Amino acid sequence: MVSTADFAEIAALAGDPARACMLQALMDGRALTAAELARAAGITAQTASGHLSRMVAAGLLRVEPQGRHRYHRLASPAVARMMESIMQVAADRVPTPRPIRTGPRDRALAQARTCYDHLAGRLGVALADAMVAGGHVELADDAGLITAHGRDFLSGLGLVLPASGTTRAFCRPCLDWSERRPHLAGTLGRALCNHAFDQGWVRRVDGTRAVSVTPKGTMELKQQFGVDLAAF
């Protein structure tokens, strides 16, 4: 059982504004250097180094040395789920009486973004809905499975899935904090996301977790999944 002290330590680490910025910067699944994370948090390299060391020691981040560089990434999908849950709770706070106007970046994040290693936002939810409606996936509140029909469908798209008997959840719903409905996570969600990038259906938007759908992606998503982006 997790001790109160351990719980408080993780909460305190994630709750610091600078560390929260760095954790959010890593939510797109990529690995970043200390200098890149320092810029994301708006702090000095020396201050960032101290924050990163604490998060690595606590198991929130892991370091991947490559040549002269050291890259940081989230330690596990569990850390990404924790961050997504915090975002959901933060979004549920009582709204202010005056409506808040969001900028283009906020709208882009709501439209389509990466949630660690899978697609989220309206695009991610629409893909999950399409997979369920097509009989490719079955989702419950906290679990999911891909059907034989679903494997055949994805194989026809050229998406080769690993065996489902892995330690990581193969297919599970992840509650989307902006849509409040599930998108696909787990091994299946990661495979779909990677396929979308590899096929040129989506591309990253610099400086944010948002992704944009290419003209090719708009056509393929409608033809293959029945997802009409014009309806978003």
Image (cartoon, grey):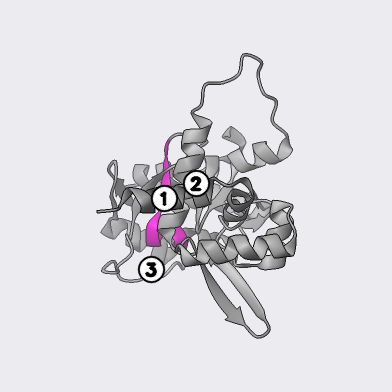
Report the residue that reaches farthest toward the bottom.
Answer: 67
Tell whether position 183 is magenta.
yes
Most distant residue in the front direction: 5
Give the residue drawn at x 52%, y 61%. Answer: 55
Q: Which residue is nearer to you in this view: 159 or 8?
A: 8
Q: Quadrant of the N terminus?
A: bottom left
**Residue 130 versus residue 196 in the image, above or below:** above
Question: What is the span of residues highlighted in magenta in the rendered image?
Answer: 181-190
Q: Earlier in the sequence, mark 1 or mark 3?
A: 3
Look at label 1 and name its amino acid: Leu
Q: Tell me, for residue 184, which label it has, or none.
A: 1
**Residue 117 falls within the magenta-colored stretch:** no
Are there few (<14), some (14-19), or many (20+) residues within 10 Å of tag 1?
many
Q: Give the amino acid type for the residue marked by disc 2 in the picture.
A: Gly
Residue 168 vs 88, above or below: the answer is: below
Report if the CB atoms under discs 1 and 2 are less than 8 Å apart. yes
Left or right: 59, with 24 as reference point: left
Using the numbered discs, state the Cα–Cα distance from disc 2 to disc 3 in whole angstroms.
Answer: 18 Å
Q: Is residue 124 visible?
A: yes
- Check disc 2 and report the residue beneath it: 124
